[in-house]
């Protein structure tokens, strides 16, 4: 009987050693992060790094579930605002239907280069204004990311502003993007990410603007037919992105978990930007191989485009109200 007793004791100890850690590893909290970022893209890689950092920071108490390749940023942002999704990683344009003032960040020709954009977004004043605007809409700022500089893909060649007049372009569902097209006399057609490729293939639109990276990762570049593939590197809009949380959900978390989510990891932000930026030269060569006429305009050729758009940032700011005007002023103060 002693042998049986000790065997049962050993078995019980073994069971406890197996079950115990499994229970301890069960996360207390789960955060679902929605994003239009396709799997395998630099944005997905950054989100996976972010997931690892946050889960380690919280000692496994918080589990991050990435929902990549979703099609509608506006819908996801609305869900986060309402509390039915915990977080969204998306472009500022995608958030602008809810936080209208942030349209000014994507105003045309606001940032001359990446260094200027980084300086502005990393500044305390601009970040705090952005954070406050989100808070007023039941959203919590996490960290910055980026889509990059957007340019024009079209069936026809673009060399001067008049070439865009009357052309139907897919536009992001954003005041800043619509007004930019309208200033050129183009016909913007607001279409969400999930329906863009079909709209190009079926000729509902004859062009679109986006970064070479997103156009490639989202396969939009395939929508234009052979002999009609043109890319004009206007770089008219620097488009940041951000990771934001639902305030309704965030407020239910203990302080230490909240801190883990809001302490900005600048190293991760800079790593993410680098991954996006180093891709462009390779992507442009790939687009040329696919049959695209990739045109890099000179400063002289770009000047008329900038002239057409010179008043648009202020027009956007005025339409979004005093807070939009203040945000644009804060941005310009850093330039």
Image (cartoon, helix red, strand yellow):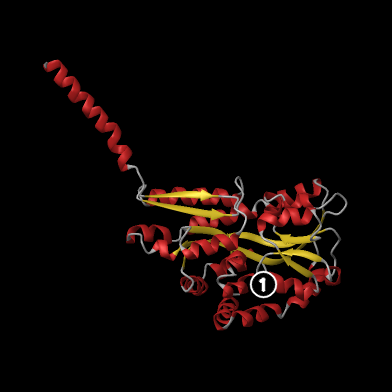
Residue shown at 88% from the left, 51% from the top: 227
User: The C terminus appears in which quarter of the rendering?
Assistant: bottom right
Q: Position of residue 330 (x, y in %)?
A: 55, 78
Residue occupying the point 48% across, 73% down: 128
Q: In front here: 12 or 277? A: 12
Q: Quadrant of the N terminus?
A: top left
Rate crowding at label 1 as few (under 14), some (14 to 19) or many (20 or more) other CA atoms within 10 Å.
many
Residue at label 1?
176
- Can I make out residue 110 in this image? no
Judging depth in this view, the residue of 57 and 102 nearest the camera is 102
Return the residue found at the far left: 2
The residue at 25%/27% (across/down) is 14
Q: Quadrant of residue 26?
A: top left
Q: Regarding mark 1 in the picture, which secondary structure is present there?
A: helix
Q: Position of residue 198 (x, y in %)?
A: 74, 53
Count of numbered labels shown in the rendering: 1
Vertically, is 88 above or below 49?
below
State the image quarter where residue 154 is shown: bottom right
Q: Nearer the viewer, residue 72 or 296?
A: 72
Tell me: residue 291, above or below residue 145.
above
């Amino acid at each position: 009987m002693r042998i049986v007793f000790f065997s049962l004791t050993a078995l019980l100890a073994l069971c406890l050693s197996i079950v115990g850690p499994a229970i301890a590893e069960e996360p207390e909290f789960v955060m679902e992060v929605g994003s239009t970022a396709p799997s395998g893209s630099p944005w997905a890689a950054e989100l996976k790094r972010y997931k690892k950092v946050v889960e380690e920071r919280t000692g496994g108490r918080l589990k991050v579930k990435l929902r990549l390749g979703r099609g509608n940023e506006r819908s996801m942002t609305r869900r986060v605002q309402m509390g039915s999704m915990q977080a969204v990683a998306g472009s500022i344009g995608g958030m602008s239907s809810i936080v209208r003032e942030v349209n000014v960040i994507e105003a045309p020709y606001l940032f001359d280069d990446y260094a200027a954009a980084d300086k502005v977004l990393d500044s305390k004043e601009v970040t705090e204004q952005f954070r406050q605007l989100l808070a007023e809409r039941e959203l919590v700022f996490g960290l910055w990311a980026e889509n990059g500089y957007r340019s024009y893909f079209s069936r026809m060649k673009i060399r001067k502003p008049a070439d865009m007049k009357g052309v139907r372009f897919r536009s992001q569902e954003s005041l800043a993007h619509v007004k930019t097209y309208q200033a050129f006399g183009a016909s913007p057609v607001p279409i969400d990410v999930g329906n863009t490729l079909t709209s190009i293939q079926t000729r509902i639109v004859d062009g679109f603007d986006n970064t070479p990276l997103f156009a490639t990762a989202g396969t939009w570049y395939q929508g234009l037919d052979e002999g009609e593939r043109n890319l004009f590197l206007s770089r008219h809009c620097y488009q940041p992105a951000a990771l934001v949380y639902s305030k309704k959900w965030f407020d239910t978390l203990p302080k230490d978990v909240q801190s883990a989510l809001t302490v900005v990891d600048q190293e991760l932000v800079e790593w993410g930007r680098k991954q996006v930026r180093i891709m462009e030269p390779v992507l442009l060569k790939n687009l040329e191989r696919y049959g695209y006429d990739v045109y890099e305009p000179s400063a002289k050729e770009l000047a008329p485009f900038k002239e057409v758009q010179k008043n648009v940032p202020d027009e956007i700011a005025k339409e979004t109200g005093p807070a939009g005007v203040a945000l644009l002023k804060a941005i310009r103060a850093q330039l």
